[in-house]
Structure formats: structure tokens, C-alpha cells
Image (spheres, rainbow, N blue to C red):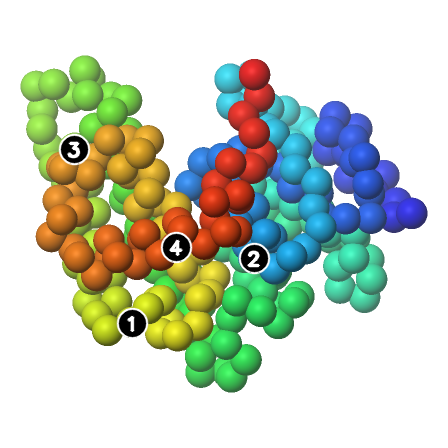
């Protein structure tokens, strides 16, 4: 039986099975990246929902694993050299899981770095810009009712990023061609979220990006996506 006592987070969210990966998350665009990857990889894991309504992510127990106070985070009891390891930041977790299993990433060095650069493209561009767009479009619309600049700025930058993806996906099934990778998993939940959560499909003019839309549908239709998009279940 793995000993996870070195991780204070397990005192608040005890592991029913400490021998498998512990996932601390919520079904947000960043959170579902990891549940989808775990489902794709067939790795056993135990999800622990982190409630934003009670600021679980700011609790001392959670911050002990992720000092930044953001989901997702994991503990892998079978980390490097067989020792438990805790990891935060969705991009870092995706890369860790891919390298742990040798899946969802090319095996050659050039392909590996090409994939990583597209993961960074999501982390540095798509996530922050789509998130800011959604904030001003859905949640802070009343605060900027007399100033259209914030929403327009992030709308236009999000559309620019969509155009970059549109170019990349011309005649490609996935971002890396024939291989479905962590680059796809990192990116598509944000495009889906901008539609189903923020209601921004029309404002972002999704119909003008047919290659992206076809790719998004392929990503969502994967069995691992259908399951992972709803894990963990939101607290009641």
C-alpha cells in the first residue's frame, strides 16, 4: 500500500485507493484535460472534486500541493524511481503522463518538441485569451457595458488564435497529423468551453473556421473525451 502521508492534501481528501493516481480537479477546460488524458491512457485514478463555491482550491491542504491554488493537480504514487510525486499545472501534468506511458506524444525528439510547442501555444495563448474573453463576455458584461474594449480585445485575439489553428489543421486529422496527442487534449476543451459554457460560438465566429470545427467534433466524439469531460462530477 502506497504511503501518501507526506501530502497534506490527503488529510482533507483521503485516498480510497492510495495505489492509484489521485486527481484533484473539476470539469473546467483545464480540469478535464487530465481526466481525458487518464481515460485515453487507461490509467487507474481516483477523482476528488474541488469545489470553487467553497474555495477548496485556496485551502491550506490544496495549496500544499499547488501553491498557486488552481486546479488540476495530481499525486502519482508510482512516480520516478517508484516514489510518490505531486504535480500541478495542466500542461505539466499532460507532459508527465505522456512521458510516463510513452503515449499521446511522438517518440522521436523532433516530433516530441513539435507537440510540446503546441501544448505551450494552448497554455500561453488559447487558455488565457479564451478565458479572458469568457470573463468579459459572460461574467463581467455589466461592468464593461460602457466600454467595449476589453471584450473586443480578447474576442479578436481569440479569433486570431482560431485562425492559427485553422491553418495548422488544414489537411490534418489532429494537430500532429495522424497522431492524437496531448496537444489536442490541451486545446479542444477550451474551444468547447467557449461555446457551451461562455456561449461565445457566434461572437467568435466559429463557422469561419471549418477545419477547427471538424477537428473539435472529432475530439469531443472520442470515448475518452465523452467520459472525461464529466469527471470529477461537480459537488452538489
Question: Is 149 rendered above or below residue 119?
Answer: above
Which residue is pictured at 58% across the width and 69% down the height? 103
Between the C-alphas of marks 4 and 1, the distance is 13 Å
Image position, residue 215 (x, y; %): 30, 58
Q: Which residue is mark 4?
A: 219
The answer to whether mark 3 and mark 1 are in CB contact below 8 A is no
Q: Is 121 drawn above or below residue 228 in the view shown?
A: below
* Label 2 secondary element: helix
Where residue 70 sits in the image (x, y, percent)? 52, 36
Residue 161 visible at all: no
Mark 4 or mark 3: name the one nearer the start of the chain.
Answer: 3
Could you tell me which residue is drawn at 26 percent across and 57 percent down? 214
Whichever of labels 2 and 4 marks the residue nearer the N terminus, that label is 2
Instruction: Give the quarter of the image for residue 11.
Output: top right
Gap in Å between the C-alphas at discs 1 and 2? Answer: 20 Å
Residue where numbered disc 3 is placed: 151
Residue occupied by mark 1: 172
**Residue 234, image quadrant:** top right
Kindly report the distance in space between the C-alpha atoms of the residues bearing marks 2 and 4.
12 Å
Q: Is residue 168 above or below residue 23?
A: below
Mark 1 or mark 3, which is nearer the start of the sequence?
3
The residue beneath circle 2 is: 40
Amino acid at each position: 500500500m502506497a504511503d501518501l502521508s507526506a501530502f497534506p492534501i490527503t488529510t482533507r481528501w483521503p485516498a480510497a485507493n492510495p495505489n492509484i493516481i489521485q486527481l484533484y480537479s473539476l470539469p473546467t477546460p483545464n480540469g478535464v484535460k487530465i481526466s481525458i488524458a487518464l481515460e485515453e491512457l487507461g490509467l487507474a485514478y481516483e477523482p476528488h472534486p474541488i469545489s470553487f463555491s467553497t474555495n477548496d482550491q485556496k485551502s491550506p491542504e490544496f495549496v500544499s500541493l499547488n501553491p498557486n491554488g488552481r486546479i488540476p493537480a495530481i499525486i502519482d504514487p508510482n512516480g520516478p524511481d517508484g516514489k510518490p510525486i505531486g504535480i500541478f499545472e495542466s500542461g505539466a501534468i499532460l507532459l508527465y503522463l505522456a512521458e510516463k506511458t510513452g503515449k499521446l506524444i511522438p517518440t522521436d525528439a523532433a516530433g516530441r518538441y513539435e507537440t510540446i510547442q503546441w501544448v505551450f501555444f494552448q497554455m500561453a495563448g488559447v487558455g488565457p485569451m479564451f478565458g479572458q474573453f469568457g470573463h468579459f463576455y459572460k461574467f463581467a458584461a455589466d461592468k464593461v457595458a460602457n466600454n467595449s474594449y476589453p471584450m473586443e480585445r480578447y474576442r479578436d485575439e481569440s479569433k486570431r488564435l482560431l485562425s492559427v489553428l485553422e491553418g495548422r489543421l488544414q489537411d490534418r486529422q489532429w494537430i500532429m497529423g495522424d497522431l492524437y496527442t496531448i496537444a489536442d487534449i490541451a486545446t479542444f476543451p477550451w474551444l468547447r468551453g467557449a461555446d457551451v459554457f461562455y456561449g461565445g460560438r457566434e461572437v467568435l465566429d466559429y463557422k469561419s473556421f471549418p477545419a477547427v470545427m471538424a477537428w473539435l467534433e472529432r475530439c469531443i466524439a472520442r470515448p475518452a473525451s465523452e467520459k472525461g469531460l464529466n469527471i470529477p462530477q461537480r459537488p452538489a
